[in-house]
Each structure stands twice: as structure tokens, then as C-alpha cells.
Amino acid sequence: MTVCTGAFARLDGLDWGFWRADIPRSPNRWRRDIQTLWTAAPRLGDAWTPSPRTPMTPTIDADRLWQSIMDIAAIGPTPEGGSCRLALTPEDTAARALFLQWCQKLGLRHEQDAIGNMFLRRAGADAGASAVAFGSHLDTVPTGGRFDGIAGVLVGLEVLRALHDAGVTTKAPLELVNWMNEEGSRFRPAMMGSRVAAGEFPLAQALAITDDNGVSVAQALADSGQAGPLNPAPRDWSAWLELHIEQGPVMEATGADIGIVTGTMHARYFQLVVTGEPSHVGPTEMNRRHDSLAAAAEVILAVERIGLGAEPGGRASASWIENIPNARGNVPHITRLHCDVRHNDADVAVAMEAQLRQAMTEIAARRGVRIDVDPYATFGPITFDTGLGTLLRNKAQGRQLSTRDMIAAAGHDSVLMAPLVPSAMLFVPSVAGITHNPKEYSTKEQIARGAEVLLDAVLELAGV
């Protein structure tokens, strides 16, 4: 498992009660303190009913929203200014606990399922109505920024805060969601929590998956106290909405305020194992070597060539490598790779996979190695609900915001929700298109505009 450096910043001034991050702690002390913080949050199912008051017009507080994002970013900071909160690590658990404390102040009912998905429910006037749901994820990649996923969860929280401050009760209930392990950096596959909840991935299989240190999902859930009592299953929702940063340069380049995501690319994921023969780098002549790393290097170049040949609309990446024995003096004999191919057109993505398999066959034969392919996941293409897309577009334009219809190139939890419930996504711009990087940035104003559009859409869908 990747180790996050700078696990916690000074958190003085945040609403953490006993917490002081400048006190030296042993690993066991960290675990005890985080468990204390978690158990101090509301018990599952607890709720507080606010006193009736005269409703006002709900208003997004851009400063409060921005500060909440910065407060979460202070958990698991990296030296470069980003965030590292791999799923179910102490950093992720601390972020969840702080988020839950904020939700407690609003009287939200907290439910959690056995894979660690968090559901925060605000009651509606019609208790029997299906809920309007929205959210995203709080976990990050090792080199994460401060906005990917986090913006979607905390914009959802700000929508609920605005309704609370205004004394507005919607007819339908509202549900804010934090999905577990969206990034897939610690446990594969990505979007694990939403996959299990959607019935696309068996719970028992997910719980048995291990990280690079051999820790299973089940053990990580137990250690972090994040295994809830609910059986993961589709929820009673009438609609699902997700705000996300674009993670690309298009909106900034075209001046769009809000991206209306009409669908996603088709993506195909592979784990490759290249097996050669161990030998000594000195005595072993070049023409006698069966070098798994050299063969993997050819595969990586083939992946890049296939991606370039599939433009526009195509992507192909080799993004993870493990080399055995990875020792000076040894010719490598086992190399593992993660690759994926993506395209707007599913047929083209399938053809890209075929090209990659043909290239690997030729490389393996020429170099005397074996290449095994595990096609462990696919997603998309998904077309999001056109009615919800129109609603988001109209709400943005009603606030004099410019819109642009877009295809999502990255995977999102909404991909798993779309087959189950009418679903839609909206993007806010990413400065310079940088993402999965400490330099990832969206401005306070850009995020607040997205929050206003989400608020307007939620009010129309849930009714007042």
C-alpha cells in the first residue's frame, strides 16, 4: 500500500473537540484517537428534529463551502499541497468522522452499509416518498488534490446546510452519500462501494480483496470501524445527482460555467502478468534473456501507440507496474502491469483491446515470455437521464450561467447508479485541466456556482 506522507496537518481551530494534531502519537494512539472521534459522532440511525420556523430562501454560503473543503483537505496533507486519503486508512476514517460531525449538526439520519458506504438522510414532509439523492466520495489517490470527489460530497452538504438555515422542508426526503473506495487506489476495483451497492459486485468477493500489504477490505473495515449494519443494496431513490470537477481542460478553454454530463466513455481494464526467466545480468548473454521487464516496456509503448491511434475520443494507459525481483544483478522474470483502454464508442474500445492483445502475442513470442491477461472490469458507455440533464441545464441557464454538454472520460459512481435510478452529473471547471495531482484546483466561485445549480435542481425534484 502506498504510504501517505504528512498524514495529518495541524487541525487546531477545527470542530474536533479533544483533537490536537501536534501531540506525538504512536500508531496505536492514532487508532484510539480516530476511534474516539468516530464514536463521538452520531450513532447509526440517530436523528435530531429541528424546531419549526418560518422558511426563507435557501442560499449557498460560498465561504462556508470553501472552508469545509479546506478542512477536509487538511486531513492527510501531502508536502506538495495535495491530499492522500486512501480508502479506509486512518486519514480516510478521520475525514469521514469530521464529515459525520457536520451532518450531526443538521440532524441528519446516518445509515451505513457493510461495505462502508455512508448515507445521510434529511426527512421530508412526505415520509413515504422516494428520496432525491446526491453525493460523491471522500477518498483520494496517493497524489490527490483537494477537490476530486470531495467537492461533490461537500457541495451536497452545503445544499443541506442552506435548506437547514432557511428552515425549508422538502416534500421528498433528501439523501447525501459518501461512497467507499471510489478511487480504487488501495483496493481494486475502483468504485467498489457503489459497485457492491448496485449489485454489480458480490459483497463477499469485495470483502476478501487485499491491498499491497495483504490487508483485506473486511479487516480494514473492522479496524476503521466503518462496517455498517445494512446489507448493501439499491436505495429507494427517485433521482441521483453528482457534482464533480471536470478533470479536464475543455470547460476552461470554452468558458463554460457548468458542464452537463450526457454520458461516459466505455472503459476496459486489464491486469497483465509478464513471466520470463530469472537469471544473472552479468553472465547471461543478451540473446539468451527472457526479460519480463523489457517485454513489459514494449507493452507499455504499444498501449501508448494504440491510444494515439484512437484519437479523437480514445485513451489507452499503462498506469501501474510491479517488478520481481526488482533487484540489482537480476534479470526480471515477473512484471505486473495495469492497463486500460477507453473510447466514446464501445466498438472502438473493443477493437483497441484486440490490437493490444495482438501486440502482446507478438511481443511474447519474440521475447520468449508469457503474458497473461486478466480483464477484471469494464464500465460504460452510459447515457445519463436526458430529463435530469435538461433540468440541470435549465437551472444553470436560469442563473445566467453558460453550459456545455460533455462526455465523462473518467469513471464515476454515477455510472453504477444510472442503470438503477434516473441519474445525472454536472461538472465545474478544473483550472488547466489538472487532476489527481496536488495542483488540482477549482475556484471558490466555480464550486459555488455548481452548488447553486444543484440546490435549484434538488428543490425542484424534491418539491417544497
Image (spheres, helix red, strand yellow):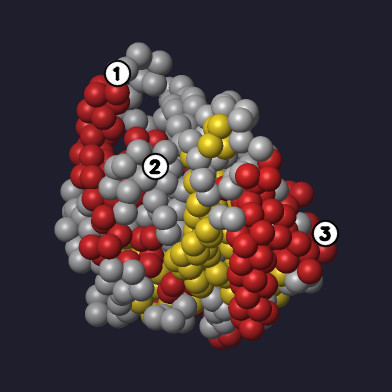
Give the percent coordinates (x, y) of residue 83: 53, 37
The residue labelled by disc 2 is 212
Mark 1 vs mark 2, foreground winner is 2
Amino acid carrying label 2: it is Asp
Q: Residue furthest bottom?
A: 387
Of residues 311 and 166, the one drawn nearer to the viewer in this rendering: 311
Label 2 sits on a secondary structure element that is loop
Q: Which residue sits at x=43%, y=43%?
A: 86
Query: Along the horizontal axis of the image, is 249 left or right of 212?
Result: right
Amino acid carrying label 1: it is Ser
Residue 47, relative to residue 346: is it above or below? Answer: above
Note whether residue 344 is visible. yes
Distance from label 3 to label 1 (Cα)? Answer: 48 Å
Whichever of labels 3 and 1 marks the residue nearer the N terminus, that label is 1
Give the percent coordinates (x, y) of residue 383: 57, 82
Distance from label 1 to label 2 (Cα)? Answer: 22 Å
Mark sitting on residue 253: 3
The residue labelled by disc 1 is 26
Label 1 sits on a secondary structure element that is loop
